[in-house]
Image (cartoon, rainbow, N blue to C red):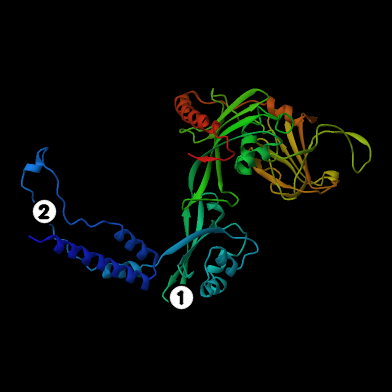
Amino acid sequence: MPSVPDIQKRIHQLQTALRGAESFAAKHPRALTATVVGLLGSFAVTAFGIAPLAPDAADLPKRVLVESLPVTDITPQLDELASHAIALSRSEQTRSSDTPDSLLKRAGAFDPAAAAFLRTDAQARRILQGRAGKLVQITADSEGLVQKIVARFPAEKPEQLGTHFTRLTVERSGQGFQARTETAPLQSQVVLGSGTIRSSLFAATDDAGIPDAIASQMADMFSGDIDFHRELRKGDRFSIVYEMLTADGELVTWDGGTGRVLAGEFTNNGKTYSSVWFKDSVTGKASYFGMDGESKRRAFLASPMAFSRITSGFAMRFHPILQTWRQHNGIDYGAPTGTPVRSVGDGVVETAGWQNGFGNLVQIRHAGGRSTVYAHLSKIDVKKGQRIEQGQRVGAVGMTGWATGPHLHFEFRVNGKQVDPRVIAKASEAVTLPGYARAQFQQTVASVKTQLAVAETITDGTSAAD
């Protein structure tokens, strides 16, 4: 049986082996190598122990247990760990001022060869071509050399916009790089958010991290209940459930990257309104409904544009060109030239062309002797006799005819007489929910009520993924 000196000698041998490992680590300054050695050094080596077996163990013979601990050469393992390169990835969005060098530098990569490839390769150059805002993930090794670049941006085929995205991959291959492009489907993610009106709807949604496109949908969703131009109050509160689209798990930030508002609650001047998106599984048609099953979709939208400020209401005004006070038989929406204009209801195009002071004008005939007028357009996107659906684009904002600035002049006429469009929108007939769909609808309502309850608790000014 080995004596205590023999055991102490073996412990000394183990300590010598550990010092050899530390010396190896000094010659191979790798983060992982140092970590492994540190972990090994933190273990205590136990040679033997004596423990009492019973209360009167002092009267019993003592046994010494000795276990031989082989010293393993860990040098091959440390060499293997040191051979593994550490790769770091960073995500960026392209900027209009970006060059290949500035993009790589911002991601912590310093690779002239990769920058040159981004400048010269036909596919790779597309990363910095066109509109900024592309999602780019750059992976580089510990020396800053690029190993892989993945850029994600909108699909190039019009029919795939909003459903797919383009993935452009640049990968190191031997001494050079290779690029490939593919199309992949976007995925949706449910997001919850809430906010309080302090100055405007968009200021509140900005504070809550909610995209403008979602705020506009929310305004449309409740437009039959609330006039967001005139009835919004400080202290009004909203909770919302909506979709955000993702590309390989990354939230899409480009235009069209938002999904649909799935449900919402809006408390305006002390009264709460609710709405949920519901799709009829039989007909395939979808619309917004109140929690009680009453449709939020009216025969006419409240506005021919996404939520925007009103520059002139349905009232007397001082005409800027004629320099006289005249009745303004419509509503003027101030917006940049090119802003899309939509039809507020189903109908047939009655006029599409130039009409004196109105400039480029579209007039649509609806059921019940009603018609709508869209004037001062910079562009007309429909033709006379064409059948139009609610929400369909008819043109773009401009300043043609007698206009002092870019805006849309909108009129609603009943039997040829101009009436206030906002009154008509609220009074128009609603689309009803079929009786056979009510059971499915109640299941949808039960689900979104839970989500809205969670959304209401979000008070830190941020949205949360479900």
| Residue 377 relative to residue 248: left or right | right
Q: What residue type is labelled 2?
A: Leu
- Residue 392 lies, in percent from the top left, at 64, 42
Q: What residue type is labelled 1?
A: Gly
For label 2, count other residues whose C-alpha is less than 10 Å away and answer few (under 14), some (14-19) or many (20+): few
- Residue 70 lies, in percent from the top left, at 17, 64
| Residue 21 relative to residue 263: left or right | left
The answer to which of 197 and 290 lies nearer the viewer is 197
- Residue 352 lies, in percent from the top left, at 74, 45
Residue at mark 1 to residue at mark 2: CA–CA distance: 62 Å
- Residue 13 lies, in percent from the top left, at 21, 67
On screen, 434 above or below 93?
A: above
Q: Which mark is residue 204?
A: none
The answer to which of 210 and 123 lies nearer the viewer is 210
Q: Which residue is drawn at 54% across and 63% down?
A: 107
- SS at circle 1: strand
Q: Residue 176 carries which label?
A: 1
Q: Which mark is residue 65?
A: 2
- Mark 1 vs 2, N-terminal side: 2
| Residue 208 relative to residue 21: left or right | right
Q: Residue at x 39, y 70 (%)?
A: 29
Image quadrant where residue 319 sits = top right
The answer to which of 5 and 214 lies nearer the viewer is 5
The answer to which of 438 and 119 lies nearer the viewer is 119
Which residue ends up furthest to the bottom in the rendered image? 175
- SS at circle 2: loop
